[in-house]
Image (cartoon, helix red, strand yellow):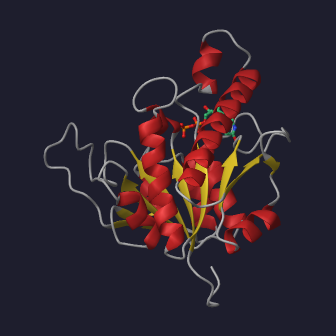
Amino acid sequence: PSTHTRSRRVLLKVSGEVFGGGSVGLDPDVVSDAARQIADAVRQGIQVAVVVGGGNFFRGAELSQRGIDRARADYMGMLGTVMNALALQDFIEQAGVPARVQSAIAMTQVAEPYLPLRAIRHMEKGRVVIFGAGAGLPYFSTDTVSAQRALESHCDELLVGKNGVDGVYTADPRRDPNAKLLESLTYERALADGLQVVDASAFALCRDNNLTMRVFGMGEPGNITRALLGERIGTLVTS
Ligand code: UDP
């Protein structure tokens, strides 16, 4: 991140599971609440990009175990992320902030193509940019893509919103009552301990390029706005 005086620019990763509200498909209440919180932060001057997952529709690895070719199953997974992106776009616009979807797979009627310089321009103009279709590449995950997009669009931080946990713990808090929330940790430690909050390639990409990551819980009302504004909630992961 450079030291010039532009306003804070962040990339928010939301997993598809969150948008599904615990089942397959979309929970409009969850999406519109996230959208309002994002719009709030934009109105306070934060530049926001979003990567949405697609696990509420399809995960390629799971589908391929049921007999669909892995790459084709991954494309199905990527198409699911675009549906999430469109829903989020709609609710952000309803909340009064312009939003654009950029897709890594060409589908010009519904989304712009992925154009990094234009994405930056959108954010500078106060528009939210939502990156859909992952990287457009089978065998990748939206976690890894979120790190890549954050780097390419010069975001100051990668924010990973989680469901059910409010950060990174010393052990699984659902199983170990002595598990403690960590305020910070390094990518080395996250990789060595095999932490699953995001996948290893996302951790490695952030580590190698000095991008800080904040893992936080989306359950608490207002937490998305807090994280976007830079409040120290959850766990900070650094090189
Ligand atoms: N996917 C892919 N390449 C990408 C991003 C996603 O093949 O660059 C596919 C993959 O099958 C994945 C699915 O899209 O399982 C949904 O994305 P992901 O599992 O990352 O979503 P999340 O778990 O965040 O909801």
Q: Is 71 left or right of 219, judged from the image as shown?
A: right
Which residue is found at the position 81% from the left and 39% from the top? 105
Q: Residue furthest left?
A: 177
Q: Nearer the viewer, residue 71 or 134?
A: 134
Which residue is found at the position 43% from the left and 73% from the top? 230
Residue 21 lies, with reference to residue 167, above or below; the image says above
Q: Residue furthest bottom?
A: 4
**Residue 201 visible to the viewer:** no
**How many numbered marks are there?**
0
**Residue 117 visible to the viewer:** yes
Query: In the image, ligand 1 is in what quadrant?
Result: top right
Name the quadrant containing residue 10. Answer: bottom right
User: Could you say where residue 149 lies in the image, as x and y percent from the top left?
Assistant: 68, 58
Name the quadrant containing residue 60. Answer: top right
Q: Is 124 left or right of 206, judged from the image as shown?
A: right
User: Could you say where residue 208 lies in the image, as x and y percent from the top left?
Assistant: 62, 66
Q: Is 179 left or right of 78, judged from the image as shown?
A: left
Which residue is found at the position 37% from the left and 43% from the top? 163
Q: Quadrant of the N terminus?
A: bottom right
Q: Nearer the viewer, residue 134 or 71?
A: 134
User: Could you say where residue 14 lies in the image, as x and y percent from the top left?
Assistant: 51, 47
Which residue is found at the position 51% from the left and 42% from the top? 15
Q: Is 37 left or right of 117, judged from the image as shown?
A: left
User: Could you say where residue 133 lies in the image, as x and y percent from the top left?
Assistant: 71, 40
Q: Nearer the viewer, residue 189 or 238?
A: 238
Q: Nearer the viewer, residue 199 or 9?
A: 9
